[in-house]
Image (tube, rainbow, N blue to C red):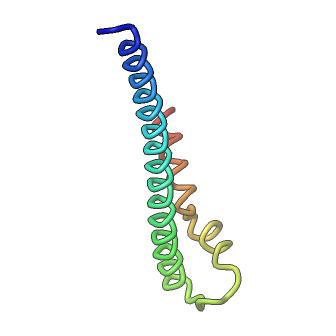
Amino acid sequence: MTNGEQKWLAQALQLAIVWYNSSKRTLIKNLKTEATNTVDDTTAKLQRVLNAAARVVSNFGKYDRGLTHFRRHVLHWLDVTGRRRFRLFVQVY
């Protein structure tokens, strides 16, 4: 190999490494975003089910006020995010 060919090969290799790392970062970022969106969607669905169950138990209407207070202080039910946080803290402890 000539000196010029070696320089060209080294530059091509550097460009390939930069492209690989940037596409890898982009892929990781997109996967994190998708995972977050999926968790948020699942959390919202579970929260709706929890609210519906609390309405059945308490005879609250869909638009009545005080459901959150009733769920927390009378039924002692946590929100879905609170449940996840509580379980995580218990496991860490």
Tell me where residue 16 appears, x and y as whole percent.
Answer: 40, 29
Of residues 24 and 77, the one nearer the viewer is 24
Judge from the rendering whether residue 31 lies leftward or rightward of residue 74; answer left or right: left
30 versus 75 height, above or below: above
Residue at 33 percent of width and 8 percent of height: 2
Report x, y in % for residue 18: 47, 29
Where on the picture, by quarter, is residue 55? bottom right
In the image, residue 33 lies at what x, y percent?
A: 50, 53
**Total count of labels:** 0
What's the residue at 65%, 67% (across, down)? 73
Query: Residue farthest to the right?
Result: 65
List x then y, in percent, for residue 51: 53, 77
Quadrant for the N terminus, please. Answer: top left
When the figure is inspected, residue 90 is found, relative to residue 21, above or below; the finding is below
Q: 17 or 28: nearer the eye?
A: 17
- Establish if 41 lies above or below 20: below
